[in-house]
Each structure stands twice: as structure tokens, then as C-alpha cells.
Image: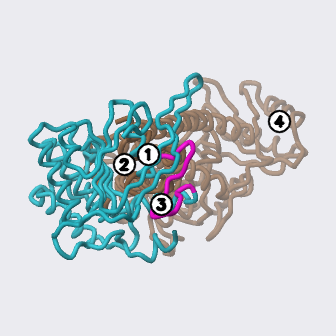
Chain colours: A brown, B cyan
Amino acid sequence: MIRHLFRLIWNRKQSNALLLTEIFFSFVVLFGVGTLLLNFGQNYFMPPGFQHQNVWRLNIAAGQGEMMPRPLLDEALRAVRALPGVLDISLGSPNTPFRFVTMNTDYSYGSKVARGVDFYDADDRYLQTLGLTLREGRWFRASDDASTRRPAVISQKVREALFGPGQPALGKAFRPNYGPGTDRHEEYQVVGVVDNVRTGGDFTAPEKSVWLRLAPHDTTSWEGASVLVRVAPGQGAALQQRIVHTVAGVTRQWSTQVRTLEADRLDKLRVTLAPLAGLAIISTFLIVNVALGLFGMLWYNISQRRAEIGLRRAMGATGPAISRQFLGEMLVLTTLGVLIGVLLAAQFPLLGAFDVEPQVYLMAMLVATGLIFFLAAVCAWQPARLAAGIQPAAALREE
Amino acid sequence: MANLLTSSAPDARPLPASSGPAPADATPVLRLVDVEKVYQTDTIETVALNRVNLVINRGEFVSVMGPSGCGKSTLLSLMGLLDEPTSGTIEVDGRAVRSYTDKELAGLRNLKIGFVFQSYHLINDLAVLDNVELPLLYRPGLSGKERRQRALAALDKVGLSARTTHFPSQLSGGQRQRVAIARALAGNPEIILADEPTGNLDSVMGEEIMDLLLGLNEREGVTIVMVTHDERQAMKTERVIRFFDGSQVG
């Protein structure tokens, strides 16, 4: 019977091509959406690598064209640190977690290159303020002022990319790739390794990250400073006001803004979820459309084949046998459509596309395959039942 | 019924040992007792068959004649167990079919009955050989090889062994009807029910098909019930049953 089904499907290849195409595209859509959702889901449950609760972002702006001398900035920061409720304070670059500001470049060690690495400027208190988890070595300290190379702390992913999995990184020097034609030959020395962080938001993957020690002279040309403030649990608007007043007490030339990292996280979440929700809605409509299409095509197919059904019944087929035949045909067609889809989908993990883990692609393939078979079975069930109920005498008379 | 479907091998009828004539014996293979068939719609009630009493004996070649709409095809559907009578009894081999389940009826159709239709009812997407194999697909216990051999043997009987890979659209009307007869023969049935088998054919092809059916009846003892409009061909059969307005008139 299986051979009979294959022969029937092959001989009807022209009319089956449309159904096959529909199944193939449904698989591709489900695979794409599945990969996205599974990837987001997997990221969501990963540890962020830092503790953003009770951390505020304090932005100090000197104004366009105005300088921000380090002594004045240090005085303001000392005053803020002295406020009751402030536990720690750290000066860094503007790409604080969850902000729509990124700084990245490539780094190399010998022939190995880590591409698209997020880099941050950070002072000696950054580790404690943001709650990073140190795995090896140490964070920056005052004695680093004397070092000949700029100290750097790297994330686990950068260590793997530059030095290889399990290889020691401490003490090694790597350099930024500024591209051809540059005369900058800086080198950074690894003093510590921290856990991977996900600063891009709840759904982003762990990033390759490098923290470079903030050089003391850097701020003289700054027009603004980004400061992270860790506060005691339960602090709110009153402390925010006091911070603003404290900075204003040092100099009235600067403006300040205080915002919680949690607020930044929610902003990022909204921006990420909006297109995701849109995509999910479009995908749902697409799948419903595909289901209706499959259902309609099968229904039409059966109405076109009433005489054949009558004939098969006359030849000795039972109602359930007719049902099984139509379900079987659908199953074979679905298998063919899914196989073509899997051939295409398998290229993504093989090529390492979009930096998504192969397991996510494989899981998405499994989910898409399962859903397609479920969809096909549900859509074929009612028409197949209808076919089983066709009275042979009536069907043969219609011819 | 269990015996009929399971213990008697895949064949309902033993293959003939010789090619000599096989006269009808008086064993009833089909019996219709007070059979009525009424088609009912919301507003109209149409009596297709009115109290029909009929016996078909093993090895007979019977033709059923009558004007269009007199109930001939309905009679054939009932005899072929494709439909149920509104009242009355149909017996196959002495047992009333009303007692059979749907599965048993399907088994009976497969084992005992071969159908030949006026419009051939071949599946256009299947080659000749696959069309002929069709009834054997629903017969449990037959291997693919056995099915193929039986289908080839049936095609050989109707003189179409050279056309096995052709599709119905590549054949003439006469050839298509031969394929339909081969399909009916492939299952080695006791009874062939033919609904105007020559109705769509010209006279020459009609004669060919008629000769084929007569040969099957005479040489292999197949019981044949044939609905026809053609008086000349009806006269070639052993018995003619006439219908008018749903009633048997002769």
C-alpha cells in the first residue's frame, strides 16, 4: 500500500507540487520563528552576569564645548559617595547596561581574532558597583597606575576567542584591530577574567566583552561622564534628588540625570518586545493561513476524487481504509515538504549563521517538524473522515 | 462470515482446470426477496425499485434491460452491496447481507464481486497495471509480487499485456473497458456486475467486449449480471430480466 501511495503521489506530482510548496514554506516560517523564539527563550534564562538591581545611572553633562576637569569630577563623585544610602560609585564609559549605546571593535592575539567585542572604560570600583563575577585574576587597582600596558579584564567568551578554551589568559597582552593604515599600536594586558555578561537586555545572548582601565587623564576632554551608583535597597526619588543637588553643589555648570538601570532595562524590553510581538502576530496569521490553505486543498482534493473513493469502496476498501489512504498521502507529502525544509534549515547550523548555537537550530527544526505534522494531521483529519463517509453507490453514480 | 473472509484463501472462486464450458448450476449465488429502494428528499419520494424478487444462480449470464430510470443501476448497486435496500432482503450465498458489518461487506465485495462500469472508472493517475492491481490492494495476505502476477495474468486474458505501463488517457475506449474487465477479473470473483459495459463503445468494440464477457462466463464459469440497453447483446445471454418503472416485468 505504501508503494501504491508513493506511485499515486508521484503520478500526481503536478497537482501535489502546490501542496508540497505550501508545506515547505510553512516549515521555513515555523523554523525561522522557532529559532528566534527559542534563542530568545534560551537567553532569557541565562544569568545576566551582573546585578543591575539597586544600581542607578548618573549622567553628568558639562555642556557642549565645556571641559570636565578630573579634579572637579572627582570632587562631585566623592560628595555623592558620601551620601547616606549610596554604597558604591564607579566612573565608566557611556555604554552602561541596557542603554542604546554600544562601543565595539575587534581584538587580536597572535593569529587569533575576537570580532565584535564590546569594550567599556571602567574605574577601580566598577566590579563591585555593577556586581560582575570575577572568575580569575583580579579587578583594576591603584597600583595599575604604574603599569606599562593598559590593564584589561576580559569575559570568558573573549578568553576563548583569543586564547582558546581552557588556556591561561592572565598576563597575556592583546591588541585592538584598528584596521589597516593606523599607526596606533596599543596593547592591553589581561589582569582578570569575569563571567560573560548580557548587557543588551533580557533576550540578548552573552556578549564578548573587554573592560579597559579608565586612564586618569581621560576626563579632561569629556563633555559628560557616565557614573554607576549602587544604592542600598529601598532607596528612591529622595536620594535621586539629593544626588542631583550634591552635584549641583560642586558646580552649577553641569547638569545631571539619575535613572535606575531597571528603568533602562524596561525601556530596552519594550523596544525588543514590540517587533517580537509583531512578528509573532504575523507568524500566527501566516500559520492560520497555511492551515486553512491545507484544509481547503485537501477538501477540494477529496471532492475531486469522489469517484475514485466510490471505486475503491466498490473494490473492497473500508471507510477507515479510505481515511487512512488520505491521511497517508498527506503524511507522505508532509514528509517530503519537511525533508526539503530540513535540507535548507540544516545549512544554518552548518554555516554557523547569526551566531546562534547549533542546538537552538536543531531544536527549532524539531519543533517546526512536529508542528507541521500536527498541522497536517489536523487539517487532513476532517476531510479524510468526510472521504470515509462517502457512499460508494452515490459517488459512482455522480460520474 | 469469518470463514468466508479468512479461511477461504484470497480467492473466492477456484481457477478453472480446463477451458471447457461451465454451465450454470441451480445454486443461488444472489437472491433478492421483496427488495424495495426508495430515494427520499425533503419533498419528493422516488421509488427506484418496487418489491423485486430475483435469484441469480452460479455460472449464469443474466442481462437486465429496461428504459432509462427504471432502476437497473440501482439494482446493480444493491447486488454489488454498494447500497442498502429500503426494505426486503438480499442474500449472498444464502446469508442476508443486512447482518454484515461494514468491514464484512467490504470483504465480500473484494472477494466475491467484480465491477465493470459504463464509464470504466479507471484512475487516470495510475498506469494500467496499477489500476488492475487495485482490488488486490485491499486483500490481506497477498504479497506485492503475487498482486503483480495476478494483474498481469488478468491483463493477458483481455489481451492487453503489452499496455501495462500505459495510462488510461493513452488508451481507446475499448481498451479502457478491457482494463476495467481485467481489474474485475484480477480478484478472481464469483460474480461480475457490469453496468452497460458497451454503452460508451462503438459497435465493433462493443462486440469485442461482449465476446470477452461471454468467454469468461463460458470458459471460466463466472456469474455475470449485465445491465444493457442493447437488445442484440442481451439476446446473447442466458436470461433477460426486464424492468419498467422500478418493477420487474419479465
Query: Chain letter of disc 2?
Result: A
A241 versus B216 height, above or below: above
> Residue A330, position in %: x, y?
42, 51
> Residue A42: within the magenta?
no
Q: Are marks 1 and 4 in contact (CB under 8 Å)?
A: no
* Span of residues in magenta: B83-98
> Do marks 2 and 4 both belong to one polypeptide chain?
yes
For label 1, the residue is: A392
Look at the image and tell me whether residue A103 can be seen: no
Q: Find disc 4 in the rendering and name its residue.
A: A243
**Same chain check for tags 2 and 1:** yes
Mark found first going from the N terminus, 2 or 4? 4
State the mark number for residue A362. Answer: 3
Q: Residue at x 70, y 33 (%)?
A: A60
Which residue carries the number 2 mark?
A: A311
Question: What residue is at 30 percent from the left and 41 percent from the top?
Answer: A15
- Going by the numbered disc 4, the residue's amino acid type is Ile
Residue at 74% from the left image edge and 57% from the top image edge = A128
**Tag 3 and tag 4, C-beta contact below 8 Å:** no
Q: Is residue A281 above or below residue B110?
A: above
Q: Is residue B135 above or below residue B167?
A: below
Q: Identify the chain of the residue marked 1, using the numbered disc in the image.
A: A
